[in-house]
Amino acid sequence: MKHSVPASLNTLSFINALPHGMALLDGDGAVIALNSVLEAISGRRSEAVTGLPLNLVLRTSLPRNDVLKARSHATPISLETDIISAVRKKVPVRLTFSAISGDTQEKCTLCYLEDISAIRKFDQVRGGQITPAGLIGHSPAMQELLEFLPILARTDATVLITGETGTGKDILAQGIHDASKRAGYPFIKVNCGALPENLLESELFGHVRGAFTGAHADKPGMFRLAQGGTLFLTEIGDLPLQLQVKLLTVLDDREFFPVGSSKKVKVDVRVITGTHRDLKSLIRAGQFREDLYFRLNVLKAHLPPLRERKGDVRLLAEHFLQKFAAGLHKKIRGFDRQSMDILARYRYPGNIRELRNIVEYAANICQGDEIAPDHLPEVVRNKDAGQQDAAAVGPGKESAAGTPILAPSAKPAGNTWRETEKNMIMEVLLQCKGNRGEAAERLGWGRSTLWRKMKQHNII
Amino acid sequence: MPHFPMKILLVLQGAWIAPRFDLATEALIMQTDDKGNPTGELREILLPGPSAEELCSLILKEGITHVICGGIEEGHYRYLTWKGLKVMDHIIGTSKEVVRHFLACGELDPETILR
């Protein structure tokens, strides 16, 4: 058996220059070389362990077969495990195996080791209430979802995440990616509702130089940038029909033509989609393809609205308060009983995003060491107003996502939420003299959300 | 070379010293006389499942004096050494070579790979 670096590969100097643990493995999965970082972690000199199986050298909890399978995988693969370090410490790590080959037929595998202790430590904060996905919650509705999370992470199937605005669809998608074998590769989010159709096509699939006016250079597109990783298509309900066909083809064939190109591009990307809209009613209205819906809805995860997550309001409010108080250098111990009762009664049409903004507001206003009812936004203190807002918001409808600070200035009584929201946007745009960036900031939204809402309300 | 009878436990994974004490499911127990010569028969033990705690209690119950293993966590290492055992960890090699080397030298150098 040959345990030497193929002449065509100049990998050793490369891996030694990197600040992470790296091992070069031969075609049989035996060690060719360790870089200096991995030598320090394992307590082994590279030349002493040449020819040995990696799990003996690293003392991983992975069975040898898993290492062999990972190494022989055609595309890069990440596995989470732990090792016993040279100082007898158990260290959680992520190993990413990536096949490399030179000019010759000799094939090698690069194994990249990341220490994930910090991530694991964070996950263990609050006795496991903060999950690997970064989702906080111990309500039965959330527990059910969190039990499902490992299943979502283990497979490569497409996932459809549904839930009202502000429930944490992005965080769940990121969590699925982080817990999956694609974790070492990019996680890219694209908002399908934020761009006009022609720009969105180029954004997703890329274009070649000269494909259209202004295409001065080739653009890879998000599908290619997410190669090996996960592409999260949020607001999938807003994807134009023409692009729905193209997306369906990509999901089936794993290849596509970039805009203006006659050359097919192959991709290995997991697709996760999210929407706050009811896709079935969009299908009935002819705005969403049924075949694409079935293709996307292989696995479905529904994020419950905050009002259905009994007990989580306190947990989340305290979590956000800790964060904001630390950021503001204030010593706020928590919420007094009355303010916590008010928060528990409120209906949160904007869900967690709204709660977060309420707590941020309270942390800014509070000058003492405890949040009192006076520190909460007026709309929250007025329980009836909160319930009225909630009544106008149902699944699939847009809500007052995270705008409690501005809500008192809106015109509430008698209007529907839709009208109130429109008035609020107009009012803020007038205050900002039409500056959308500033208006979005004041409203607590991203520019794309403001743009989408303006479009919905026919303001543009 | 130690001049007292030894009862040695090797943590195994097939023919090799197991890379992890906490994940091992096999062990080999051997005894020597005060001159370091093997006495009695080698005993191979199949553990019901991987557990560092169970393995520690087996080691104490059997009156083991020397443990040879791969990676072991600091807590278990300290526990066994506090109980008066000599723990030789970070060992890589086949059980056959490791035993031969240990009986010949009375020591094991973690730097040396015995294959």
Image (tube, coloured by chain):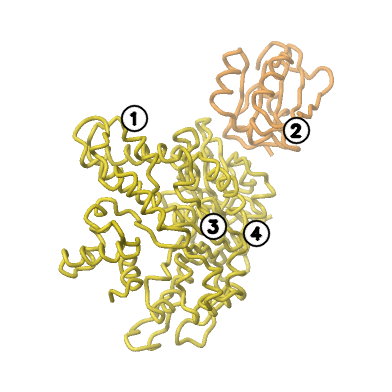
- Between disc 4 and disc 3, the foreground one is 3
Could you classify mark 4 by the number of other residues whose Cα lies within 10 Å: few (under 14), some (14-19), or many (20 or more)? some
Q: In percent of the image, x 38 and y 85: which residue is there?
A: A209
Q: Secondary structure at mark 3?
A: loop
- Give a yes or no on whether discs 1 and 3 share a subunit: yes
- Give a yes or no on whether discs 4 and 2 share a subunit: no
Judging by colour alone, the chain drawn in yellow in this rendered image is A
Mark 1 vs mark 2, CA separation in Å: 69 Å
Q: Secondary structure at mark 4?
A: helix
Going by the image, does A318 lie left or right of A88? left
Q: Which residue is mark 4?
A: A72
Of the chain colours in the picture, the one used for chain B is orange
Q: Which residue is mark 3?
A: A182
Sequence-wise, the earlier of marks 4 and 1 is 4
Mark 3 vs mark 2, CA separation in Å: 40 Å
- The amino acid sitting under disc 4 is Ser
Q: Which residue is mark 1?
A: A337
